Every structure is written in structure tokens, then in C-alpha cells.
Image (cartoon, rainbow, N blue to C red):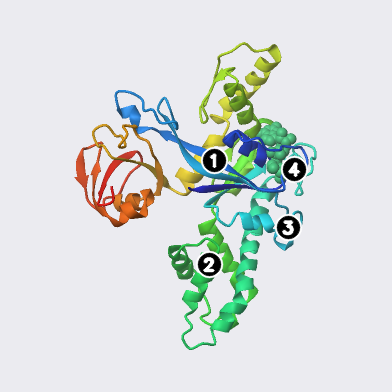
Amino acid sequence: MLSVALAGKPNAGKSTFYKAATRADVDIGNYPFTTIDANRGVSHVRTHCPCLDLDARCDSDNCRDGKRYVPIELLDVAGLVPGAHEGKGLGNQFLDELMNADVILNVVDASGGTNAEGEPVEVGSYDPVEDVEFIESEMDLWLAGIIERNWEGIERQSRSPEFDFEDALSETLTGIGATEYDVAAVLRELEYEPDPMAWEDEDREELAQLVRERTKPIVVVANKADVAPEGNIDALEEAADRVVPATAEGELALRSAADAGAIEYAPGDEEFTIAGDLSEAQRDGLDQIGSVIDEWDGTGVQAALNEAVYGLLERITVYPVQNETHWSDGQGNVLPDAFLLPTASTPKDLAFAVHSDIGEGYLHAVDARENRRIGEDHELSEGDVIKIVSTAN
Ligand SMILES: Nc1nc2c(ncn2[C@@H]2O[C@H](COP(=O)(O)OP(=O)(O)OP(=O)(O)O)[C@@H](O)[C@H]2O)c(=O)[nH]1
Ligand SMILES: [Mg+2]
């Protein structure tokens, strides 16, 4: 499963985001280091279900009237403070927990109501742009530290006549989540000394930064947008490439109200409707959230997850089926599964994603929308419904 990690300084709203997005019960508190041990759960990205093109909506548990929710892993770690890579705050153990994440959501307190350590300060008195920069540099330095620790081994190997520097680097970097493809791309970008003994700390830091940008790309969540002073969100949007304004607290309130039957609301909706009896206080609270989400086209929680997976990672959703007429599996379940594949994936990649045996035994594929065979190197697109024919199924 694709893994999305919430990182950021303490008290920014990571656990509130996590609780809203997974519905798991976790601690939230207005002080730094509420979370110590990481929380790991399942959330979803939202897309259009292909059943919108059928006569009836599908019966998948992950489809709500054509709104399709595709599972991803969500990780909520302890807050990071400047110097974390050297053990400041709760240290760098939880940086290690980010190792397997495919993409990072840097949750920033856009209201400027918490300082660099996450302690509450007057709203607007701290510049949240600082949090964009220090999180990136902490992650870069943390990776540089891991590379540094591996360097002695690389130097030792370099004394052997069979030594291949690229192979040795590749081994170190794949250990921190880079694919061979990433390593090749990074080494093409970097002008480097072929002798590991000649490398300086700065060289390793430059390497670490390139690897981090590829393997741990970041979307900034401008959280607490409900109380952020005007201009803070604009400043964040200028400082980072991808910024999603959000109110995690608003999303949590809407999800709880929807679960209680008080409102009609599905994650990612840009509005909600009142469905049950409410007290005046509840109504006022919802009205306030209503005006915030009017301004930002939703709470931003679903938008941030979607931006990470579909925007930054450029994934597409593909639906494998066994029956190309009914778009169902062998038991008649319509559109039972959805896979988040990299852009330009082929039917064979889908086959391997379903199961390595299906991939090994791949024979051909059928585009169920068009009802025609597609070639092995055909590039799949968002929303494709594909039947794989394999010796293994
Ligand atoms: N106004 C406002 N407050 C929020 C929002 N999201 C979270 N908060 C508040 O921010 C405080 C910190 O929330 P947490 O979710 O515990 O923050 P965290 O980032 O997990 O903090 P640590 O676990 O300490 O790193 C709590 O008081 C939340 O109620 C939001 O969207 N708007
Ligand atoms: Mg927390």
C-alpha cells in the first residue's frame, strides 16, 4: 500500500489530521509532544468511481455513490524540532519511522500560533514559512547522517579491486528507500568524485538532499487555516511548491457530525447539509466551519492526501476485473479493487501489482471500457477498467 506520512513540528495538528482521516482514536493536545509513539492507520484518496459510467452504482465498500475511496497507509509521527537529526526534542528515532513513506505531508501551523518548538504563542507572532524550511533541512541532514554512517563501509570496500562505487552507493541508498531508478537519476544529476575517500561532508549532504527530494517529496499542509491571519497562507504558497490550506479540526468535526447522523458529508466534499436535530451551539459551530470551507473549497484534508498521491506522486487509479462485460470479479462483485499505479504503467505492471504469479503468467489484457485487447506496452490511464488474462487466473 502507498504510504503517506504526516511530519512537522509539534502541536501543528498532525494527530488531528490523522484522527479525521483514519477515524482512529488518538491523543490530541495543545502542547508539544502529545504524540510519542507513531500512529499507523488506513486512510483514502478520493477519485471518481468508474461505476458512474454504468447503469447502477457499484457495491464496493469503498464507493459512496460514485465517490471512490482508495486505501493508502497514513502515518502520524512525533513532532520534529530544529536539531532533531542530532537528537533534539524527541530525537531522530521517528525520522527513521519516515523511512518507508512514499510522500510527506508537512503539517504547518499556518496561524503562526506556535513557535519552533511547538509551544503556544500569540496567533500571528511566529512565521510559519520557517517550518517549511527547517523540516526539509532536518530530513536532508538525517539522510546525510545515515549516508555518513555507511561511508566507512564503502571506503573499506573501495580497497578491493572489484570495487564498483555506483553499486556501493546504490546499496546504501536503496537501504533508505531509493529505487535503482532513483539512484541512477541522482548520480546523473550530481557531479561526484569517483573515489569515496575524497568525499567531504558537503558532498554527502548534497547527495542526501537530492535523494530526499526524490524519495520523500513534500506537500505542505497549511493547517489551522480557520484562524490564520490574512497573508500567512499566501506567504506559504510563495515559499513552497505545493501547499494545501486546511482545517484538520474542521474535518474532524464534520466527520464526527456525519458519523452521528447530524449532517450529510463525505470526505472531500466542498459542502455539507444538515440532516439531524441540532442544538443551537452545534449549529453555530457547523456554520463557522461552513464559512471556512466555502473559502477554501473544503477542509483541505482530502485535498492534501489527493495532492500528495495524484498530484505529487502522479499516481493513477486502475481497476482490475475478471469479467469485462460486468466489470466484476469471479463472485460478481462489481469493481472490487483499485490500484494506485505510477503514471505510464502498463497492463503488465498492473498484473504484477495484483500478484506476482499473475504477472509472471501474463498473456494479454482487455480494456473493459472499449471491450478491446490492448498491447503489453499500452499506457494505462486514470479510471481504466482492465481484465488481465494470465496462466495464473
Ligand atoms: N484552530 C485550529 N486548531 C487546530 C486545528 N488542527 C489542530 N488544532 C489544534 O492544535 C493542537 C495540536 O493538535 P495535535 O493534532 O495534537 O498536534 P500534533 O501535530 O499531533 O502535535 P504533537 O503530537 O505534539 O506533535 C490541538 O489543540 C488541536 O485542537 C485546526 O485546523 N484549527
Ligand atoms: Mg500528535
Q: Which amino acid does label 4 sit on?
A: Thr
**Residue at image coords 48%, 70%:** 187
Q: What residue type is labelled 2?
A: Leu
At mark 1, the secondary structure is strand
Cα separation between marks 1 and 3: 26 Å
Cα separation between marks 2 and 4: 32 Å
Q: Residue 250 carries which label?
A: none
Of badges 1 and 3, nearer the viewer stands 1
The numbered mark, 3 or 4, whose residue comes first in the sequence reads: 4
Q: What residue type is labelled 3?
A: Gly
Q: Which mark is residue 34?
A: 4
Distance from mark 4 CB to nearest ligand 1 atom below 8 Å: yes
Q: Is residue 14 left or right of residue 380?
A: right
Q: What residue type is labelled 1?
A: Val
Q: Which quadrant of the view contains residue 141?
A: bottom right
- Front residue of 27/180: it is 27
Distance from mark 1 CB to nearest ligand 2 atom below 8 Å: no
Can residue 292 be seen by looking at this rendering?
Answer: no
Cα separation between marks 2 and 1: 27 Å
- Front residue of 130/270: it is 270
The numbered mark, 1 or 4, whose residue comes first in the sequence reads: 4
The residue under label 2 is 173
Q: Which mark is residue 42?
A: 1
Query: Residue 302: image x %, image y %?
Result: 53, 35
Sort mark 4 into few (<14), some (14-19) or many (20+) by Cα contacts within 10 Å.
some
- Height in image: 230 above or below 77? above
The residue under label 3 is 91
Cα separation between marks 3 and 2: 22 Å
Sort mark 2 into few (<14), some (14-19) or many (20+) by Cα contacts within 10 Å.
many
Query: Residue 272: image x %, image y %?
Result: 54, 21
